[in-house]
Amino acid sequence: MKRKILIIGIIIICIVLIQYFDIYTKALKRYYPDKYAEYVDKYSEECNIDRNWVFALIKAESNFKPNSVSTSGATGLMQIMGDTANEIAKEIRNRGGRP
């Protein structure tokens, strides 16, 4: 019984400390930064894509390192191959947008 009360007490203290020092928010910002938010917000809205999905993709592909290059040659935040980037740019131009 005393062990159970001790464990509950420790859990309560941990929750209070997490809340007091805002550890959850700090951890989120560290591991999931909102770098490039200006661009992500603009283009995710323009393309009707959830901004969180874009941030998750960037995190998974490059971990927010803009000069990342994969072993297969994909580059950038979202790890896009050069030929793919050229095709997308051409498609955007054909629709009257800007690449």
Image (cartoon, helix red, strand yellow):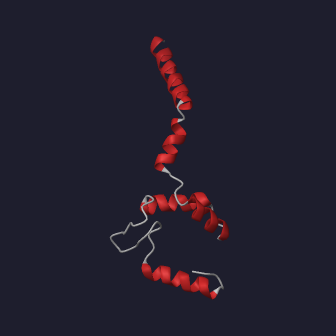
The percent coordinates of residue 2 (x first, y second) are: 47, 11
Which quarter shows the C terminus? Answer: bottom right
Residue depicted at 55% across the width and 29% down the height: 20
Number of on-image labels: 0
Residue depicted at 37% across the width and 69% down the height: 69
Single out the residue that lies furthest toward the top. 2
Residue depicted at 54% across the width and 23% down the height: 12
The percent coordinates of residue 45 (x first, y second) are: 66, 66
Single out the residue that lies furthest toward the bottom. 94
In front of the other: 72 or 34: 34
Q: Is residue 54 above or below residue 93?
A: above
Image quarter of residue 53:
bottom right
Is 68 positioned to the left or the right of 85 in the image? Answer: left
The percent coordinates of residue 22 (x first, y second) are: 54, 35
Is 8 positioned to the left or the right of 69 in the image? Answer: right
Residue depicted at 59% across the width and 61% down the height: 38
Q: Is residue 28 above or below residue 68?
A: above
The percent coordinates of residue 74 (x first, y second) are: 40, 73
